[in-house]
Image (tube, rainbow, N blue to C red):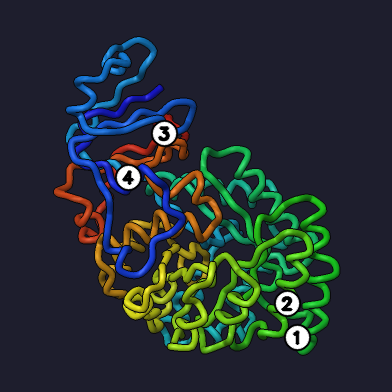
Amino acid sequence: MLLIKNIKKLVQTEDTTRTRVSGKDMAVLPCIDDAWLLAENGLIADFGTMRELKTDNRGLNSNDGIEQMDAGGRLVFPSFCDPHTHLVYAGSREIEYIDKIRGLSYEEISKRGGGILNSAKLLRQTPEEELYRQSLERVNEIMMLGTGSVEIKSGYGLTVEDELKMLRVIRRLKETTPLVIRSSFLGAHSLPAEFRGRRKEYVDLVINQMIPAVAGENLADFIDVFCDRGFFTVEDTERILEAGSKYGLRGKIHANELDFSGGIQAGVRYNALSVDHLEFTGEEEIEALLGSGTMPTLLPGAAFFLGMEYPPARKMIDSGLPVAMASDYNPGSSPSGNMKFIMSLGCIKLRMLPEEAVNAVTVNAAYAMGVGEIAGSVARGKKANLFITKEIPGYEFMPYAFGSNLIDRVILEGKEVHFP
């Protein structure tokens, strides 16, 4: 058992858990001042005010079998949930970063054999053990930065063998780290060079060979498609989603990053758990999302890194939608898994209030990766995945101080995690 005492503010508390937060409710952030929290068997057992603790008759103030941690007037948050990453990859792509500085677009780099295809080439050359080692470093990095739940996609293999290799690495990360991890099969991430001009044949390969192989080893929780200009069409996307649904794989779609692609509407039609990116989102897309079970998930780190237009978060929220945010941690368009910085981009670039940003990286982000029952808030029975801040005035300071490391201690499954 772990008892955390003298918490200045316990953030995102829930007596009755919410599946997601929408519209004007995103500006509400429930907190408890001068609080305590008890973790038992890796779960949140109870929490309340210090005044209540002082009159408690359960013996929590004794030292008998209870580890005590004094928060010393600091804030405690539920760990960040990051519902869209590609952090299993080989090598890096800083040379393309220089190409971007010189003025080449994301699509131009891709057409020259860079981008996703460059990562696919590197991944195919990298042994599975080395791929795991590199990926574990990134997992340790995001844990240190406060992330407790993460979704990781395949998509840099683009062959049956190499997609399976990526997904096996993700499974191993699930087994060897305290993070909550969900995996997505993204065979339709890009068209391999050897299939140029034969997109339908590659989609057939994804449907007829990749999906059965992935399902046969139970390697994925979700299925994803890059539905956008220059990648895969709505028809391709719907074929793949239909095929995945036969194996119990729910969709999570890359949509409308580069243009109005129809991907948002396709995701809603097929009950995708989330549609992600959404830089190009208008009235029709918002109307399609309203009342659906599909979470709009914004990736401002990619728009920031690529110098692209940001998604219209303010319009979405004001229209009554829920919004989640994710890091999109990947080597080409968002080489960072720092969810605190994503909160800052949410406030600075997307005009979100601090409360909205916190909701977007906790409750709504947990929904967007299907872990809302166990993560995303401080609630009894959820995993005791938390972090304690350094001394800060309040939760508003987290996105405000965009370049500062404000996380002091990380607790996953009720135990403090120590980093080298």
Numbered disc 3: secondary structure: strand
Which numbered tag is attached to residue 192?
2
Please tell me in which quadrant of the rendered image residue 350 appears: bottom left
Numbered disc 4: secondary structure: strand
Identify the image quadrant of the N terminus.
Answer: top left
Q: Residue furthest left?
A: 393
Residue at image location 55% in from the left, 83% down from the top: 109
Numbered disc 2: secondary structure: loop
Residue 38 or residue 206, whichever sits in front? 38
Amino acid, disc 4: Thr
Q: CA distance from mark 1 to mark 2?
A: 7 Å
Q: CA distance from mark 1 to mark 4?
A: 51 Å
Which numbered tag is attached to residue 96?
none
What residue would you read off at disc 3? 44
Which numbered tag is attached to residue 196?
1
Q: Is tag 3's residue or tag 4's residue first in the polypeptide sequence?
A: 4
Q: CA distance from mark 2 to mark 4?
A: 46 Å
| Residue 138 visible in the snapshot | no
Q: Is tag 2's residue or tag 4's residue first in the polypeptide sequence?
A: 4
Amino acid, disc 1: Arg
User: Where in the figure is residue 195, as x and y percent of width and height?
Assistant: 78, 81
Residue 404 or residue 270, whichever sits in front? 270
Amino acid, disc 2: Pro
Q: Is tag 1's residue or tag 4's residue first in the polypeptide sequence?
A: 4
What residue would you read off at disc 4? 13
92 sits to left or right of 189? left
In contact (CB < 8 Å): disc 1 and disc 2: yes
Mark in front: 2 vs 4: 4
